Image (cartoon, rainbow, N blue to C red):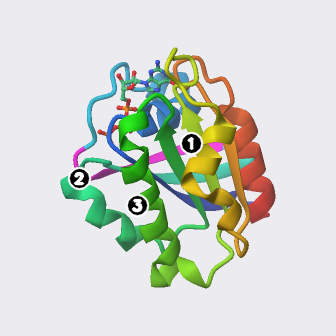
Amino acid sequence: KLKKEQINILVVGLNNSGKSTIVNHFKNPEEKSLVTVPTVGFSVEKFQNQGVNFTAFDMSGAGRYRSLWEHHFKSSQGIVFVIDSSDRMRLVVVKDELDTLLHHPDIVDRKVPILLFANKMDTPEALSSVKIAAALGLEKIKDKPWHISSSNALTGDGLQDGVQWLVQQIR
Ligand code: GTP
C-alpha cells in the first residue's frame, strides 16, 4: 500500500483572524473542537485532505507569541497566512508581519508557496481580496507562488479551493 503523502504547513496571522477555525474545519467531525479559544503558543493539528496527511502548526497570533512563528519556517512546506478582512485598523500590522516573514532567512530564498485567506468575508466591513492584496503589496512577491482566497471559516466557503491550490504547489 502506498504511504500517504505528508505535508507540514504553518498557519499564521494576527490573533482573532480565524486560524483555529480554519484548521478545525478540515478535521474529522469526531476530532473537531466545539469551541475555538485563543491559541496559547501554538497547537499541532492533523487532518487529511486530497489524500494528503497534513500536519498544521496553528500558531497563536497574539503579539507576545508572534516571535514563535519563525521557529517553524524551515520545516514548513507551505504557509497559510490568515487575515481578518474586516479588521481594517490592523491591516498595517498584517503587512508588517507578512513582510517580516517574507524577509526571514528561512523563507527568503525558498520557493515556499504562500496561501492567504482573506477571512471573515461574510462580515459587512470586509474588504475584498483584491483590496487586501493591494494593501499588502502582494504583487511585489515575485519569487514565490502565492494565492489569495476570500473565505468564511464559519461556513467553510473558499477554504477547499485554497488548500487545493496549496497542494498543487507542493506536489
Ligand atoms: P488566535 O488563536 O488568538 O491567534 O486566533 P485565531 O486566528 O485562531 O482565531 P479563531 O479561529 O479563534 O477565531 C476568532 C473568532 O473569529 C472566533 O470567534 C471565530 O468564531 C470567528 N471567526 C473565524 N472565522 C470567521 C469568519 O469567516 N467569519 C466570521 N464572521 N467569524 C469568524
What is the distance, in whole Å, between disc 3 and disc 1 at their CAs?
30 Å
Q: Which residue is identified by label 3? A: 96
Q: What secondary structure is the stretch in magenta mostly built from?
A: strand
Query: Label 1 sits on what residue type?
Result: Phe
Label 1 Cα crowd, 10 Å radius (few <14 / some 14-19 / many 20+): some
Q: Name which of mark 3 and mark 1 comes first in the sequence.
A: 1
Query: 9 above or below 32?
Result: below
**What residue appears at the point 43 percent right and 34 percent down from the top-left corner?**
18
- Point out residue 9 in the picture as x, y percentages from the top left corner: 55, 58
In the rendered image, the quadrant that contains the N terminus is bottom right
- The magenta span reads 40-48
Q: Which residue is identified by label 1? A: 47
Q: Secondary structure at mark 3?
A: helix
Query: 114 above or below 104?
Result: above
Indicate which disc residue 63 carries: 2
Asked if the magenta segment contains residue 115, the reply would be no
Q: Secondary structure at mark 2?
A: helix
